[in-house]
Image: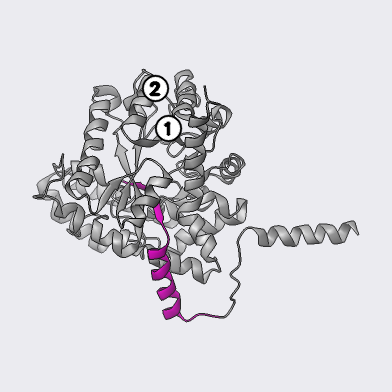
């Protein structure tokens, strides 16, 4: 009897990860794509990380006006604009308020954060019929019903907090709804997965206070970019679920600490948190990483032989020819679905979402997901793999909304005081 019960438990566990669709009738490719297009329009799609604000800043844009507004409406440049987002069904891209690690030494981190927040706000005041700010899932849903694209904001790098804990609440008031604790270098809050210094061996003492204060005011803690030790420190401190706003699975990229290991993903799921899969090919596929590293070394040697640096004007045609003759090994939309499958098979459907890193990973986006218009391609691949409409809704927004609501409710409950 015990053996029968055990077999039934194993069978249930094998099927519990993913809700199979009731209609098992095979669909044609045309039907799959039509359904994917319909779902993309019918569902709210939220993306945990779009680097549009800093992309605009790099082009000298501090404020969106009717004169330069084409850049965010229909220019077709970069990875995001309104027309392509509408085409792809993207409804709530978290605008990344990205703070380069260099400002941790030179100063100006808070000023840059404020200017980028103002830049996002200017999109909504210049085009109030198209964009709206959003500080909660309820506001995203209201904007969705009104046909507007929501622009919630997350701050990538907690450097603008400085050493003043009250700045956590300051940025909540300014519209920030998650903070990536650090970026490419250790900062005053946390060690970075990209930095070998291990300044704090995880979170700093101040960083622990920051996590608790973020819980208290209603800002989601983002564990993307932080070291493994810092992740475990966050798990000790947080009273609510956290997100990894734009990370993928280390299972496919061994040794790449910027992605999350299976052990970390399991702990994240115990916390009821969500990993939002990054679309950059280097995050998705070890072969892409190898292609990038080999080409980078070859190009470096070629330019050194010609006594040129990468930024020299004379180097541009050489670099262009090199890139033509040494193509980068892009991942594809199927690989993104592989990462989603991996999380689902490891911990279940409730702990995975989307965090593209559009406008943040350069020319490394996978085939089939080159810009925000192509979300239906990913949905189509998930349909092929047997994901139900409800599964896809969880991946597209419900899982992240659950975390976001939980964080806001905890802050409002008084339990955090």
Q: At 43% from the left edge and 66% from the top edge, which residue is drawn?
A: 39
Q: Is residue 78 magenta?
A: no
95 w.r.t. 232: above or below: below
301 w.r.t. 82: above or below: above
Q: Position of 73 compared to 185: left or right?
A: left
Q: At 54% from the left edge and 68% from the top edge, which residue is drawn?
A: 385
Q: Is residue 45 magenta?
A: yes
Q: Position of 409 compared to 133: left or right?
A: right
| Residue 265, position as x, y percentages in the image | 56, 44
Q: Of all residues shown, which one is farthest toward the right?
A: 1
Q: At 35% from the left edge and 23% from the top edge, which residue is drawn?
A: 167
- Under circle 2, the secondary element is loop
Cα gap from disc 2 to disc 1, whole angstroms: 11 Å
- Under circle 1, the secondary element is loop
Residue located beneath label 2 in the image = 188
Where residue 133 sits, quadrant-wise, is top left
Quadrant holding the N terminus: bottom right
Q: At 51% from the left edge and 55% from the top edge, which residue is drawn?
A: 394
Residue located beneath label 1 in the image = 192
- The number of numbered discs placed on residues in the rendered structure image is 2
Provide the residue span drawn in magenta.
26-50
């Amino acid at each position: 009897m015990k053996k029968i019960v055990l077999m039934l438990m194993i069978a249930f566990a094998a099927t519990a990860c993913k809700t199979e669709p009731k209609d098992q009738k095979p669909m044609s490719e045309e039907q799959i794509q039509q359904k994917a297009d319909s779902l993309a329009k019918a569902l709210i799609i939220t993306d945990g990380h779009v680097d549009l604000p800093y992309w605009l800043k790099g082009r000298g844009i501090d404020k969106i006006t009717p004169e330069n507004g084409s850049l965010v409406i229909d220019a077709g440049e970069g990875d995001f604009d309104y027309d392509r987002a509408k085409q792809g069904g993207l409804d709530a891209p978290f605008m990344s308020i990205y703070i380069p690690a260099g400002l941790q030494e030179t100063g100006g981190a808070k000023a840059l954060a404020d200017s980028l927040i103002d830049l996002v706000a200017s999109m909504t005041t210049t085009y109030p019929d198209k964009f709206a700010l959003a500080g909660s899932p309820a506001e995203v849903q209201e904007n969705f019903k009104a046909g507007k694209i929501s622009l919630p904001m997350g701050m990538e790098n907690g450097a603008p907090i400085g050493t003043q804990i009250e700045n956590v609440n300051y940025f909540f008031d300014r519209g920030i709804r998650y903070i990536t604790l650090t970026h490419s270098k250790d900062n005053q809050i946390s060690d970075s997965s990209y930095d070998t210094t291990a300044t704090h061996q995880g979170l700093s003492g101040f960083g622990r206070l920051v996590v608790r204060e973020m819980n208290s005011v209603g800002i989601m803690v983002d564990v993307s970019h932080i070291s493994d030790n810092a992740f475990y420190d966050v798990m000790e401190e947080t009273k609510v679920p956290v997100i990894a706003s734009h990370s993928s699975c280390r299972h496919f990229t061994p040794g790449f600490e910027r992605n999350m290991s299976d052990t970390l993903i399991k702990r994240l799921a115990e916390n009821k948190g969500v990993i939002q899969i990054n679309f950059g090919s280097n995050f998705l596929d070890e072969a892409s990483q190898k292609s990038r590293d080999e080409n980078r070394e070859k190009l470096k040697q070629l330019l050194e032989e010609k006594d040129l640096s990468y930024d020299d004007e004379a180097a541009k045609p050489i670099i262009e020819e090199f890139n033509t003759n040494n193509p980068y090994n892009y991942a594809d939309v199927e690989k993104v679905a592989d990462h989603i499958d991996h999380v689902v098979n490891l911990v279940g459907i409730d702990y995975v979402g989307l965090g593209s890193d559009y406008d943040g990973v350069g020319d490394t986006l996978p085939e089939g997901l080159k810009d925000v218009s192509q979300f239906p391609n990913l949905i189509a691949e998930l349909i092929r793999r047997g994901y139900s409409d409800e599964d896809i809704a969880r991946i597209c927004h419900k899982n992240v909304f659950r975390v976001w609501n939980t964080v806001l409710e905890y802050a409002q409950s008084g339990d955090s005081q």
